[in-house]
Image (cartoon, rainbow, N blue to C red):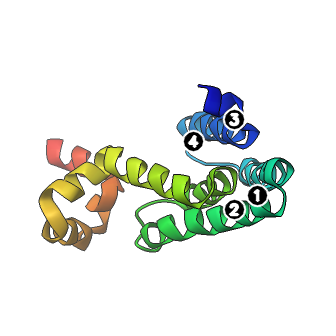
Amino acid sequence: MEWVAGNPAIMAALVIALAAAVTDARTRTIPNALVAAGALAGCLLNGWTSGAAGLTRAAVGCLAGFCVFLPFFLLRGMGGGDVKLMAALGSCLGPLPILQVALAAVWRAPRWRSWWRFGTASWRARCAAPATCWGRGSRAVRASRTS
């Protein structure tokens, strides 16, 4: 845990991720103020600890975090707040760690595990009916199946 305590930007990323998880679980939204504060904290803390190289790392990490999840947003697989949150976390962590976090998030997310397991043919079949694509409208689908 020394690597976390020695880098304030990683500590900020953990706090931002925890706050986003709590607010997302309660309200199903991620506040823009939290995302903006996270991106600003990442830039300032990386700049403070590493100078111009830290600012560059924060900017590239922000761009990498945004670009990794942008296709999922465009395919309606996740909300815009998730994409902006990954950009803010990217500004705290940097480009390579945010790609590792993104890979872990995609691998561990329950709704994505079935997509990886069954392949793209199953994904296309589920997305043909918008109510079942990535769990959207899953309550309505379950209710219609039980009645």
Q: Quadrant of the C terminus?
A: top left
User: What is the CA distance from the residue labelled 4 to the residue labelled 1?
Assistant: 29 Å
Q: Which residue is mark 4?
A: 24
Q: Is residue 44 above or below residue 130?
A: above
Q: Position of residue 56 (x, y in %)?
A: 74, 66
Q: Are marks 2 and 1 in contact (CB under 8 Å)?
A: yes
Label 4: few (<14), some (14–19) or many (≥20) C-alpha neighbours in 10 Å: some
**Which residue, given by chain and number where applicable, does mark 1 sit on?**
54
Residue type at mark 1 is: Gly
Q: Which residue is mark 2?
A: 57
The residue to which callout 3 is attached is: 11
User: Quadrant location of residue 11?
Assistant: top right
Q: Is residue 52 left or right of residue 5?
A: right
Amino acid beneath label 2: Arg
Pick whichever of labels 1 and 3 is earlier in the sequence.
3
**In terms of secondary structure, where does tag 1 sit?**
helix
